Image (spheres, helix red, strand yellow):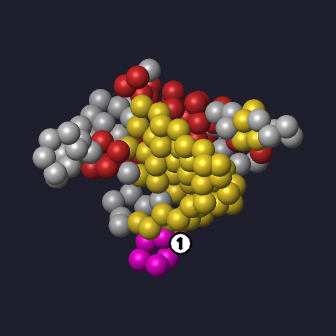
């Protein structure tokens, strides 16, 4: 499982010119799933996201987590996080979970965030989405559960 986390002042996902998910303040999380991902990877990543201290305290230091700033999360499914561009010019997606399984994992991931008390907006799985965000910092982190 891979996730790109961006601290944002706002984020929005539109599909066919309709807003399907939007937040003010928090994180935009692009998430992709690989074959073999399951509850262990989801739970670890959700714990990490919910507790990640990337928001500024009164001294301007990254010392606060989502709950402490009443932040929200906009989760965007993104299979291209498993794109391999090592050979040739066309990306290969052989490491990405097949679409049906990836959609199940995406829904489990969103549900797990909500179970931790995180307010979640989400993109639309399988749709051509436009993602607008204002990265605050910029602050961006990458989580790859293969490294855990």
Would you place residue 19 above or below residue 73 in this image?
below
Identify the magenta region.
14-19
What type of secondary structure mainly makes up the magenta span? strand
Asked whether residue 18 is drawn in magenta, I would say yes
Question: Can residue 35 be seen in the rendering of this structure?
Answer: yes
Question: Can residue 100 be seen in the rendering of this structure?
Answer: no
Q: Quadrant of the C terminus?
A: top left
Crowd rating for badge 1 (residues with CA inside 10 Å; few <14, some 14–19, many 20+) = some
Total labels drawn: 1
* Residue positioned 16% across, 51% down in the render: 89
* Residue positioned 51% across, 27% down in the render: 44
* Residue positioned 27% across, 34% down in the render: 35
Would you place residue 118 above or below residue 50 in this image?
below
Q: Secondary structure at mark 1?
A: strand
Residue extending furthest toward the top? 148
Where in the figure is residue 36, as x and y percent of width and height?
Answer: 29, 29
What residue does disc 1 label?
A: 19
């Amino acid at each position: 499982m891979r996730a790109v986390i961006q601290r944002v002042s706002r984020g929005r996902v539109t599909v066919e010119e309709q807003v399907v998910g939007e937040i003010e303040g928090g994180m935009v999380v692009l998430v992709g799933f690989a074959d073999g991902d399951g509850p262990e990877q989801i739970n670890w990543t959700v714990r990490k996201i919910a507790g990640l201290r990337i928001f500024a305290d009164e001294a301007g230091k990254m010392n606060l987590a989502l709950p402490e700033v009443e932040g929200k999360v906009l989760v965007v499914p993104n299979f291209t996080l498993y794109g391999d561009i090592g050979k040739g010019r066309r990306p290969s997606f052989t490491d990405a979970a097949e679409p049906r399984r990836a959609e199940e994992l995406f829904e489990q991931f969103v549900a797990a965030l909500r179970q931790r008390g995180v307010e979640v907006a989400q993109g639309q799985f399988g749709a051509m989405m436009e993602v607008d965000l204002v990265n605050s910092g910029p602050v961006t982190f990458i989580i790859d559960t293969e490294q855990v």
